[in-house]
Image: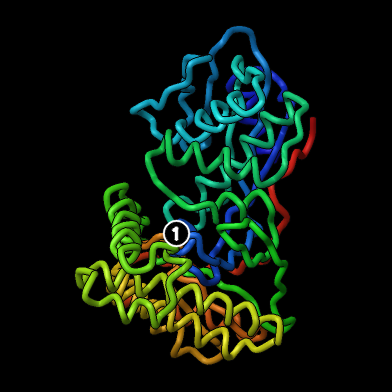
Amino acid sequence: MERAVQLHRDTWNAEPDVIASAPGRVNLIGEHTDYNDGFVLPMAIDRRTVVALSKTEGKDAVFVSEHHPAPVEVIGPSWQPINDPTWVNYPVGVIDGIERHTGLRGNGLRISVASDVPIGSGLSSSAALEAATASAVLGRLDVKLPKSDVAAICQRAEHEFAGVRCGIMDQMASVLGAIILLDCRSLEVDLIALPSDVSVVILDSGIPRGLSQSAYNERRGQCEDGVAKMQQRWPEIRALRDVTPRMLDRAVDLLPEVVARRCRHVVTENERVIEAADALRAGDAQRFGELMWQSHESMRDDYEISLPEIDSLVERAMASDGCYGARLTGAGFGGAVVALVKTKRVQEFASTVIAGYNEETGREGTAMLVSADVGARVETS
């Protein structure tokens, strides 16, 4: 928090009116299911993005961050995405969404951002920025909204200002915090706890996550294409959430081979998420770990979002003593692996896996022990 405040002082010689923060998240299981109305099991992590905000005269908003120290001015109140630097589109989209939702003007703002959520690692640094911005702007306006509405505003910013047609998981995880089983259709939430003797370790591959708009949106489009084709036989289907493995087997004549594999990942991943939540409720870390590995195989083979280095990192983790399971986490094409590890073996696990991975690949992978954290909140106002 102190870094964002100091950045604000150094940039504008002013004290912030509001300081807000929001966590990144690691998805324990349930990848690419959220935009298919499915189930996910994310954990908000104890790495946060902090936004310091002060009011100023005029209609524009000015942004600065630790990673981009040159202030960027965006003209309001008719907010539009900008081409450079693109990181500003996340908070601008949130401001636009709040104005549309509340009818109140959020312009005339100075916003400073500091974060310890790794960028490009599949840990939702963008959702943390969106949720922290939303909390700060709403705090400045003295408006309270339902948390699901806040998440939807943040998701809209991602869609319309960043150009990524993401689901609602990242934003809900950052807004709500904790470990949640989320139904992405109804937005129903169940709180889930880890067994007391296990920990979550994030293994960063050192490969920036290549979440290209085209690759992500292509897969979403393939899922939608699969649904449209299966509706010819089952008109009641609204999303892949409504498709069972048996239905998918019977739809082989309707679906191109690639589309069938994309759909198979989502359909089976939804089943894995439900079983994984039950395993955690029962304290069965062994079964949860098995499901993590099955999830990774599906992402690698059916959804094709992994990379050889990521596969190697997962395999090294799975072969390490004390690891229950590991999988690619996040949208794919780089980023990080999440592992469930016996707490007493965490240090040895992390050092051994990363050392072997770095030697094999020449990358600079890192390990990070994380715990569940609270959701987006106003720190001071």
Question: Left of 253 or right of it: where is 34?
Answer: right
Tell me, yes or no, if residue 312 can be seen here.
Answer: yes
Q: Is residue 126 above or below residue 121?
A: above
Q: Quadrant of residue 107?
A: top right
How many marks are shown on the rendered structure? Answer: 1
The residue drawn where x is 51% and y is 57% is: 123
The residue drawn where x is 40% and y is 80% is: 245
The residue drawn where x is 62% and y is 20% is: 106
The front one of 132 and 170 is 170
Q: Quadrant of residue 95?
A: top right
The front one of 302 and 222 is 222
State which quarter of the image contains the C terminus: top right
Question: Left of 342 or right of it: where is 36?
Answer: left
How was the colour assigned to the protein in this rendering? rainbow
State which quarter of the image contains the N terminus: top right
Spot the residue most to the top.
58
The front one of 118 and 216 is 216
Amino acid type indicated by mark 1: Arg
Residue 322 percent location from the top left of the image = 57, 89
Residue 349 percent location from the top left of the image = 53, 82
Residue 204 percent location from the top left of the image = 45, 65
The residue drawn where x is 57% and y is 84% is: 288
Name the residue beneath numbered marker 1.
238
Question: Left of 244 or right of it: where is 149?
Answer: right
Q: Is residue 347 above or below residue 381?
A: below
Query: Label 1: few (<14), some or many (≥20) within 10 Å?
Result: some
Tell me, yes or no, if residue 204 can be seen here.
Answer: no
Secondary structure state at the residue bearing disc 1? loop
